[in-house]
Amino acid sequence: MQLRLVRNPDIISEIAASGSGLLMVGFAAETENVVHNGREKLAKKNLDLLFANEATATFNSDHIEVTAYTQQSLWQHKAMRAISWRAICRRANLG
């Protein structure tokens, strides 16, 4: 059996580049170099906020820790619930 894969369009990058004014939030499941790869994706995709995690660490787990990035901040290894709330609160104060 041969499986032929097709690359999907990078929709979030296209929307971010359009200047829509929307808050652009991305998610990345990384298998290595979470901090470095997350910062790179945040910049490359022109996102406002990126949540990244160690992909294999979440298998069979109810507790997910993520690293969240903005252009100015890095919140590393926090529980997803806590970091999501912090991001929402910061966004509310921004605008």
Image (cartoon, helix red, strand yellow):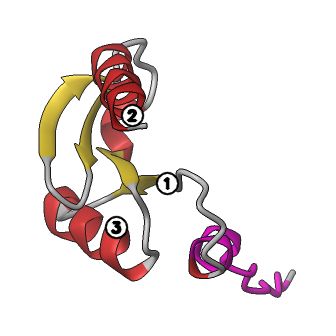
Camera-nearest residue between 10 and 86 = 86
Q: Which residue is mark 2?
A: 91
Height in image: 70 above or below 7? above
Q: Which residue is mark 1?
A: 26
Residue 19 sits inside the magenta stretch: no
Measure the alpha-carbon separation of dots 1 and 3.
8 Å
Pinpoint residue 65: horizontal percent, then vertical percent: 27, 28
Graded by Cα atoms within 10 Å as few (under 14), some (14 to 19) or many (20 or more), the crowding at tag 3 reads: many
The local secondary structure at tag 1 comes to strand
Task: Please indicate whether residue 35 sits to the left or right of residue 85 in the image.
Answer: left
Image point (72%, 85%), residue name: 7
Q: Marks 1 and 3: CB-CB under 8 Å? A: yes
Measure the alpha-carbon separation of dots 3 and 2.
17 Å
Ranked by sequence position, the earlier of labels 3 and 2 is 3
Q: Which residue is mark 3?
A: 42
The local secondary structure at tag 3 comes to helix
Image quadrant in which you'd find residue 5: bottom right
The local secondary structure at tag 2 comes to helix
Q: How many marks?
A: 3
Height in image: 38 above or below 77? below
**Callout 1 amino acid:** Gly
Residue occupying the far front of the picture: 95
Pinpoint residue 23: horizontal percent, then vertical percent: 53, 51
| Stretch of the chain drawn in magenta | 2-16
Image point (35%, 23%), residue name: 80
Q: Quadrant of the C terminus?
A: top left
Ranked by sequence position, the earlier of labels 1 and 3 is 1
Ranked by sequence position, the earlier of labels 2 and 1 is 1
Pinpoint residue 52: horizontal percent, then vertical percent: 33, 49
Pinpoint residue 81: horizontal percent, then vertical percent: 37, 15
Task: Please indicate whether residue 70 sits to the left or right of residue 88 in the image.
Answer: left
**Callout 2 amino acid:** Arg
